Image (cartoon, rainbow, N blue to C red):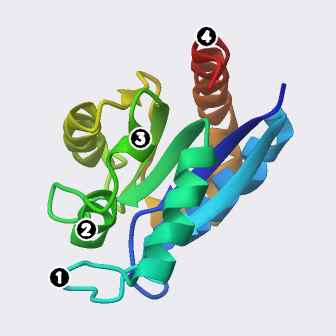
């Protein structure tokens, strides 16, 4: 059985390095027999500073999220946390994430690779009754991503295997 995974890019900044990372994750996950959707939060939020979506955008996102068997959130770490637009996007949904596995890819220009954003986002996902995966991927020194991206493939493979494990056990 093929499972549908949604990759969620958690920033709305133009030219963000995390967008390159999300595109890389999107291409890599296809090698693991998943169907994939790519969601950019900036394409759905109508009011970037306060959140909210028009009904058509919300319904479209909700439909994708409901059909998804699991998720991978790719998000930069801004000031030791996740971007506000990611939180605004997630807060529009709840049931769509219930009892579904979620992998996280932290992105940072520093050495920790978004470790703090991963830990904080896991707390939010628990409140959504989602299943945050143990295996996260920490993309550090992202300004050098093009030269280093091959080194992340093994970490992504571990994440994808865990995601598939939960999809199969949950039979979503």
Q: Secondary structure at mark 4?
A: helix
Which quarter of the rendering shows the N terminus?
Answer: top right
Which mark is drawn over residue 169? 4
Question: Relative to residue 26, is residue 80 drawn left or right?
Answer: left
Q: Is residue 10 left or right of residue 157?
A: left
As measured in the structure, the alpha-carbon distance from the residue carrying label 1 to the one carrying label 3 is 22 Å
Image point 65% across, 43% down: which residue?
5
Instruction: Kindly identify which numbered label has been placed on residue 88.
Output: 2
- Res 97 label: 3
- Residue depicted at 48% across the width and 66% down the height: 18
Q: Looking at the figure, which quarter contains the C terminus?
A: top right
Write the residue at 15% across / 63% down: 79
Q: Are marks 3 and 4 in contact (CB under 8 Å)?
A: no
Helix or strand or loop: what does disc 1 sit on?
loop
Residue 39 at x, y = what percent?
56, 65
Do we see residue 145 in this rendering?
no
How far apart are the alpha carbons under marks 3 and 4?
Answer: 16 Å
Residue 53 to residue 102: above or below: below
Do residues under tags 1 and 2 come within 8 Å of each other at their CB atoms? yes
Q: Earlier in the sequence, mark 4 or mark 1?
A: 1
Q: Which mark is residue 50?
A: 1
């Amino acid at each position: 059985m093929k499972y549908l995974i949604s990759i969620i890019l958690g920033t709305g900044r133009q030219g963000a390095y995390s967008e390159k990372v999300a595109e890389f994750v999107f291409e890599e996950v296809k090698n693991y027999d998943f169907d994939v959707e790519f969601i950019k939060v900036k394409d759905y939020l109508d009011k970037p500073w306060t959140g909210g979506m028009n009904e058509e955008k919300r319904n479209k996102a909700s439909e994708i999220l409901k059909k998804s068997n699991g998720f991978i959130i790719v998000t930069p770490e801004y000031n030791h946390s996740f971007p506000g637009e990611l939180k605004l996007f997630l807060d529009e949904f709840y049931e769509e994430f219930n009892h579904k596995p979620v992998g996280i890819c932290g992105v940072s220009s520093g050495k920790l690779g978004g470790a703090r954003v991963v830990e904080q986002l896991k707390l939010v996902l628990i409140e959504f009754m989602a299943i945050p995966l143990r295996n996260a991927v920490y993309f550090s020194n992202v300004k050098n991503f093009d030269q280093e991206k091959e080194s992340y493939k093994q970490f992504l493979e571990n994440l994808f295997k865990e995601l598939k494990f939960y999809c199969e056990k949950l039979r979503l």
